[in-house]
Amino acid sequence: MTQPVFRFAPSPNGRLHLGHAYSALLNERFARALGGRLLLRIEDIDVTRCLPDYIAAAESDLAWLGLTWERPVRRQSGHFGAYRAVLDGLRARGLVYPCFCTRRGIAEAAAAHEHATGERWPRDPDGSPLYPGTCRALAPGEAARRIAAGEPHAWRLSSPAALAAAPGPFSYRRFDEALRQETVPADPARWGDVVLARKEIPTSYHLSVVHDDAAQGITHVVRGGDLEAATDLHVLLQRLLGLPTPLYHHHGLVPDEAGRKLAKSLGSRPLAELRAEGVTPDAVRARLGFAPP
């Protein structure tokens, strides 16, 4: 039987908070229960926001909590060549296309449509206006000319082509805290033509995480419930790329005093502040429902 492999994969664009601690500790709990391995992966594809100081701080915070992990630690910023090769393979199969539309332009088009018709523009699972596939119809020569001219662009997955190349139905296996498993249907079409890379970054969260989970032999993915919908898309990418689909567990999110999920963008208190105030690792573990290490 293959030894289970888990991973905690923070994005170092700020300091870790209690929500990160909960996810890391839950990965540790599952790994220990199944006699598995625990990896740390640094998801730093956004090199402008993911700073070395944050990476060092994340490792320090996790070690303070009593967590240990295998080394070396995989940093995604060191594997852009691998992600670019995957993207090139999808391009060669006609499954991605260059898109010159901006998020603002898509949002404005959706708002104009809603104002004119009174009909709600379709949304993706994140709540953003679904991309209508405008640039999918561009002639190859026109797209190449605009790329050569240095026009900013992204690379989008062609949902119709992808679903034709890897037809459904789609599903994955998930497990609960008691390690019971069940099959869950997946609907990747609801993501539409999602962005897989940008001109300045040859990958996206979706592309890099699917690649890395396979490259690292991850068998069990434990992550927040805010990423549950993304699993539908990841199942499609795994099938397109011939990669295995791990088991998934999407846990509840740790709320703040106002009931909102903890987030760096909201200024949620980092673990570093708790440490500075004298809060102990055992106290953090107890607050989150975990025993001392």
Image: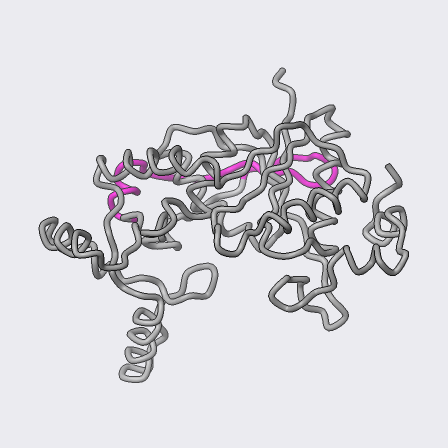
Q: Which colour scheme is used?
A: one colour
Q: Position of residue 138 (x, y in %)?
A: 14, 56
Q: Please say if 219 is above or below 285.
A: above
- The residue nearer to you, when weighing 91 against 58, is 58
| Magenta-span inclusion, residue 175 | yes
Magenta residues?
159-183
Which quadrant is the N terminus positioned in?
top right
| Magenta-span inclusion, residue 88 | no
Residue 68, quarter of the rendered image: top right
Q: Where is residue 8 in the image (x, y as percent from the top left)?
A: 64, 40
Q: Position of residue 198 (x, y in %)?
A: 34, 52
Q: Is residue 200 left or right of residue 71?
A: left
Q: Please say if 189 is above or below 118.
A: above
- The residue nearer to you, when weighing 182 against 85, is 85
Q: Please say if 281 is above or below 110.
A: above
Q: Which residue is drawn at 23% across and 35% down?
A: 93
Q: Which residue is drawn at 64% across and 32% down?
A: 39
Q: Is residue 172 left or right of residue 28?
A: left
Q: Which residue is drawn at 49% across and 32% down?
A: 245
Residue 100, quarter of the rendered image: bottom left
Q: Please say if 162 is above or below 154.
A: above
Q: Which residue is drawn at 82% across and 39% down?
A: 66
Q: In this view, does 284 lie to the left or right of 128?
A: right
Which quadrant is the C terminus positioned in?
top right
Name, please, the residue furthest toward the top: 1
Q: Position of residue 156 (x, y in %)?
A: 30, 51
- Number of on-image labels: 0
